[in-house]
Image (tube, rainbow, N blue to C red):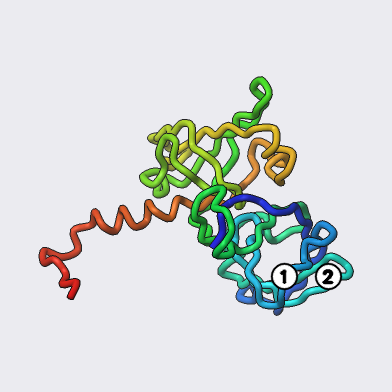
Amino acid sequence: MFTGIITGMGRIIAIQSQGSSSHHGKRLTIETPAGYLDDVSLGDSIALNGACMTATMLDAANHQFSIDISAESLAKTCGLDKVGIINLEKALRAHDRLGGHIVSGHVDGIGRITHFAQVGESWELRILTPREMGKYLAYKGSITVNGVSLTVNRVTDLAGDADNAPASEISINLIPHTVQHTALGQLAEGSQVNLEIDLIARYVERMLQDTSSQQPSLR
């Protein structure tokens, strides 16, 4: 589990194919800030742009670690198939502060940036999300964007047309600290981002489903 509070900015510096077909995954080597791996052990979970991965190789002396990512994970995420800057977050410990919100590290969908511009001292970020995610998005609700816990300021459901499928657009305000200390500052109009809905919304949907006319026994 994670909180959506980024603990470091890393860089994918090498990508190695694990096989010759599209059914094979890749091995990524990530460079971290100095000292970032001091409390990390082999097998620990680290979120890369919001996707939970397992450290399979550690080279703390050179500030590097590697992860193996499956073809399925590559197909369901973005930004993990090329060299570049990424957001890092170590897994939540039981005694840590929950500074953002409960994040599982499982990407629900890929969004596209439709607007990213400075407004006063802050930045407005608008993201077009898959329509099926729209019912989980709410004003002042939480969403994870490339691993960063953020608050939704506005949700607009778009009907779509002959060229575009129905979708939902969310607007988010980014303070200067977030822009400066995460990889979100690297985004531009047209960029793709990993999205994870609030975990609580999943359970609310499940509870509202009429799956049985009989109440389960709790004894």
Q: Are marks 2 and 1 in contact (CB under 8 Å)?
A: yes
Residue 162's image quarter? top left
Q: Residue type at mark 1?
A: Val
Name the mark on residue 60: 2
Mark 2, Cα crowd under 10 Å, few <14 / some 14-19 / many 20+, is some
Farthest right residue in view? 62
Helix, strand or loop under label 2:
helix
Q: Is residue 159 left or right of residue 61?
A: left
Q: Is residue 134 left or right of residue 84?
A: left
Helix, strand or loop under label 1:
loop
In primary-sequence order, the first of circles 2 and 1 is 1
The image quadrant where one finds the N terminus is bottom right
Residue 188 percent across, percent down from the top left:
68, 37
Residue 12 percent across, percent down from the top left:
77, 60
Decide: is 2 above or below 67: above
Residue 159's image quarter? top left
Farthest left residue in view? 214
Q: Residue at x 68, y 60 (%)?
A: 80
Name the mark on residue 40: 1
Residue 126 percent across, percent down from the top left:
56, 34
Q: Residue at x 66, y 20 (%)?
A: 120
Q: Is residue 181 left or right of residue 69?
A: right
Q: Residue at x 55, y 42 (%)?
A: 150
Q: Is residue 55 left or right of residue 111?
A: right
Decide: is 124 above or below 51: above
